[in-house]
Image (tube, rainbow, N blue to C red):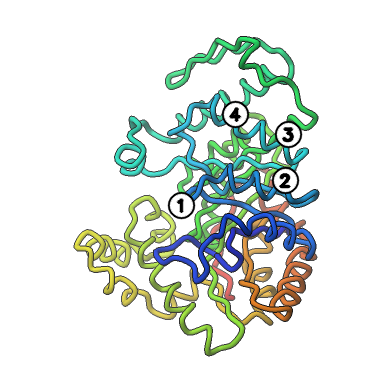
């Protein structure tokens, strides 16, 4: 299993509340070097309060082996050619260590935050990925640019704007997804899928992976190298006492996600439709303080991996090891003890065998659907 992390260290989920330590852009290089020195697999950056490509440039320039990636950058506000250039430049700088993680975002943000026209995301992101790859193929191999689609039409690339070939042109693309339709598109055109934090192991196993497999079958693709990169909901701390506030924050995150229609399928899968409906009502009324009260202990433990630092690594492996290949987690480093703890966690998680997850991603050899299974305990 590969281990990656957001920055600042210890940030495990965007949620409603800011991390205890906000991202310090001046420390990105040092933190990336630290992660590399303790054996971390990668660092990823989400597109929230800082430009992810700028942050990743700092991380890539400071390191030699650490993988870097967006988790995720929002696709539709950028043209495919603009996105292709961002990725091409970072792949050159990192010497082949970059992964382009793309997200579609929901209608309200696309229209009202980005000012971009809305269209159904699944067919649009399928076409978008094809267009990005067509631009790369043009630059790398001189293939004439000829993208003709419902959303993007690209047929002009003059020498001044031709970025030219690079040493490592095979840039992996991961798609953020929750619903089966986007999972199917990921299986068709992408190199990996990034489940949302509300996607429990049983949802990934029973809903997402069959959709990925069906998409791959439609496109005649092999899933042997396909990755499932999970950003889990985690409540972790040095001690049981410090864990109390982490659990409180986790309840708030689950309740907020339950109120979001785009994530309804993950709650419906667990028979929590009523919870999601009530959370939506409270959200519309802006009764934010009432939302966490909806989350009882059973629901909390269904979505969140909870534990002290000495146990959280094994709990993550036990919970996700049979369905994901990459997992996102870190702890804040306050002293040498924390650094040593994170190094031990990195070794433990990355020593986990991913062969069971690989088999789950490839799917049954007879092409039958996976059977829904009971959610494993933490």
Q: Quadrant of the N terminus?
A: bottom right
Q: Quadrant of the C terminus?
A: bottom right
| Horizontal and vertical percent position of residue 372 | 54, 59
Disc 4 or 2, which lies upstream in sequence? 2
Quickly name the residue at label 3.
Answer: 92
Do the numbered discs 3 and 4 sit on residues whose CB atoms are within 8 Å? no
Quickly name the residue at label 1.
Answer: 49
Whether residue 150 is visible, yes or no, is yes
Which circle marks residue 61 in the picture?
2
Q: Give the structural element (helix, strand or loop) at label 2.
A: helix
At label 3, counting other C-alpha atoms closer than 10 Å, the crowd grade (few under 14, some 14-19, many 20 or more) is: some
Disc 1 or 3, which lies upstream in sequence? 1
47 lies left or right of 287: right
Distance, label 4 to label 1, CA atoms, is: 22 Å
Distance, label 2 to label 1, CA atoms, is: 21 Å
Distance, label 1 to label 3, CA atoms, is: 25 Å
Q: Give the structural element (helix, strand or loop) at label 1.
A: loop
| Horizontal and vertical percent position of residue 69 | 64, 46
Which residue is at a point 69% across and 19% down the rendered structure image?
Answer: 139
| Horizontal and vertical percent position of residue 89 | 67, 32
Disc 4 or 1, which lies upstream in sequence? 1
At label 2, counting other C-alpha atoms closer than 10 Å, the crowd grade (few under 14, some 14-19, many 20 or more) is: some
Which residue is at a point 23% across and 68% down the rendered structure image?
Answer: 287
Distance, label 3 to label 4, CA atoms, is: 12 Å
Disc 2 or 3, which lies upstream in sequence? 2
Which circle marks residue 84 in the picture?
4
Do the numbered discs 4 and 2 sit on residues whose CB atoms are within 8 Å? no
């Amino acid at each position: 299993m590969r281990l990656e992390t957001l920055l600042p260290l210890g940030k495990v989920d965007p949620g409603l509340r800011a991390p205890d330590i906000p991202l310090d852009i001046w420390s990105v290089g040092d933190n990336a070097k630290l992660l590399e020195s303790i054996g971390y697999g990668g660092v990823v950056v989400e597109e929230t309060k800082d430009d992810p490509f700028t942050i990743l440039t700092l991380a890539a320039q400071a390191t030699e082996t650490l993988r870097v990636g967006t988790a995720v950058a929002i696709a539709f506000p950028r043209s495919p050619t603009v996105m292709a250039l961002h990725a091409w430049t970072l792949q050159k700088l990192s010497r082949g260590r970059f992964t382009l993680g793309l997200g579609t975002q929901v209608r309200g943000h696309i229209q009202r935050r980005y000012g971009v026209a809305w269209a159904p995301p699944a067919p649009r992101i399928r076409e978008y990925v094809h267009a990005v790859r067509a631009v790369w193929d043009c630059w790398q191999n001189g293939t004439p640019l000829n993208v003709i689609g419902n959303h993007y039409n690209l047929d002009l690339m003059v020498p001044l704007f031709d970025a030219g070939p690079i040493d490592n042109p095979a840039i992996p693309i991961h798609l953020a997804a929750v619903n089966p339709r986007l999972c199917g598109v990921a299986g068709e055109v992408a190199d990996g899928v990034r489940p949302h934090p509300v996607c429990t192991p049983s949802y990934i196993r029973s809903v997402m992976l069959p959709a990925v497999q069906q998409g791959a079958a439609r496109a005649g693709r092999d899933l042997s190298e396909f990755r499932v990169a999970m950003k889990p909901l985690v409540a972790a701390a040095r001690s049981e006492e410090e864990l109390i506030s982490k659990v409180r924050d986790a309840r708030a995150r689950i309740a907020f996600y339950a109120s979001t229609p785009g994530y309804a399928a993950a709650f419906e899968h667990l028979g929590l439709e009523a919870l999601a409906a009530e959370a939506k009502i409270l959200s519309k009324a802006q009764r934010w303080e009432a939302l966490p009260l909806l989350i009882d202990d059973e629901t909390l433990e269904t979505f969140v991996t909870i534990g002290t630092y000495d146990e959280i690594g094994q709990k993550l492996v036990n919970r996700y090891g049979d369905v994901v290949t990459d997992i996102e987690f870190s702890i804040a480093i306050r002293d040498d003890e924390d650094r040593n703890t994170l190094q031990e966690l990195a070794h433990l998680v990355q020593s986990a065998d991913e062969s069971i997850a690989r088999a789950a991603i490839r799917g049954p050899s007879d092409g039958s659907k996976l059977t829904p299974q009971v959610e494993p305990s933490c």
